[in-house]
């Protein structure tokens, strides 16, 4: 897995299925220069691009990446039509799933946020062939149905919005969400420190101090999880 900065990730399954999650790259101040170029993704084509919601800091570069790579784009029908994704590349999904892509199974789960223009916000659970699961929360606040996400999917790896300030989970509330609802093996904080007004990394580290499961990733540096 490689963090692209903000809420963007590239995930490659043990079987070689390459996925992009919320790949906002061109104007993302946290994305390293070598990961900003669309040509990079033409060389190592993703099977699919997963979109949690239509806000620019998550979906702005998806149409260009879809055109360059030919990848399927996963999201709600309203989002994909608003982004003018060609119909053959639209992989419509909504809360529930599942959907099989390569050697992984993807489930769409709720998120408590907004989405413009169109569609409801989502999170995604990715189940790998060996049974491990990864949960990308998308932009969200904590909500009671997180208990069902834990019960149904038991996320081993949690990609957690942790510094959204007034736009989502702040660090202390993100840490509460983990304590209250989840039992992951690995916690990867994301969506912090990108813009003025968002929580800086220091506040996220303070909120999760002492939790050995937390890994702070460096954008552009691949990590084996």
Image (spheres, helix red, strand yellow):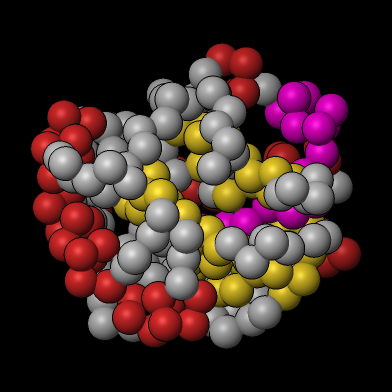
**Left or right for 3, reference 10:** left
The image shows residue 99 at horizontal and vertical percentages of 72, 75
Write the residue at 44% across / 44% down.
7
Q: Position of residue 199 (x, y in %)?
A: 18, 38
Q: Residue furthest top?
A: 33
- In this view, the residue in front, 206 or 94, is 206
The residue segment tinted magenta is 38-56
Q: Nearer the viewer, residue 143 or 58?
A: 143
Looking at the image, residue 103 lies above or below residue 145: above
- Horizontally, is 215 left or right of 54 in the view? left
- In the rendered image, residue 115 lying in the magenta stretch gets the answer no
Left or right of 40 on screen, residue 36? left
Residue 64 versus residue 109 in the image, above or below: above
Q: Position of residue 88 (x, y in %)?
A: 87, 64
Q: Residue at x 26, y 82 (%)?
A: 144
Name which quarter of the figure residue 108 lies in.
bottom right
Residue located 34% across and 65% down the image:
183
Residue 167, position as x, y percentages in the image: 24, 54
Q: Residue at x 52, y 19 (%)?
A: 32
Asked whether the viewer can see residue 215, the reply is yes
Residue 56 visible (yes or no)? no
Q: Is residue 69 left or right of residue 9?
A: right
- Of residues 28 and 160, the one nearer the viewer is 160
The quadrant of the rendering that contains the N terminus is top right
Q: How many marks?
A: 0
Quarter occupied by the C terminus: top right
Residue 50 drawn in magenta: yes
């Amino acid at each position: 897995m490689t963090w692209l900065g903000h809420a963007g990730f590239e995930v490659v399954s043990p079987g070689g299925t390459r996925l992009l999650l919320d790949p906002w790259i061109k104007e993302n101040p946290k994305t390293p220069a070598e990961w900003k170029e669309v040509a990079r993704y033409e060389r190592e084509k993703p099977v699919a691009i997963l979109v949690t919601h239509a806000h620019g800091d998550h979906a702005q570069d998806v149409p260009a990446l879809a055109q360059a790579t030919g990848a399927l784009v996963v999201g709600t029908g309203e989002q994909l039509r608003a982004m003018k994704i060609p119909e053959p590349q639209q992989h419509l999904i909504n809360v529930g799933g599942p959907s099989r892509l390569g050697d992984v199974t993807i489930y769409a789960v709720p998120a408590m946020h907004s989405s413009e223009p169109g569609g409801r916000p989502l999170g995604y659970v990715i189940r790998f062939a060996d049974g491990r699961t990864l949960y990308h929360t998308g932009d969200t606040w904590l909500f009671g149905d997180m208990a069902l996400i834990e019960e149904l999917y038991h996320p081993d790896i949690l990609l957690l919005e942790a510094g959204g300030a007034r736009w989502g989970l702040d660090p202390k509330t993100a840490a509460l969400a983990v304590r209250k609802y989840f039992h992951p093996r690995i916690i990867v904080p994301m969506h912090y420190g990108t813009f003025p007004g968002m929580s800086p990394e220091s506040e996220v580290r303070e909120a999760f101090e002492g939790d050995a499961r937390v890994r702070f990733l460096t954008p552009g540096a691949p990590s084996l999880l």
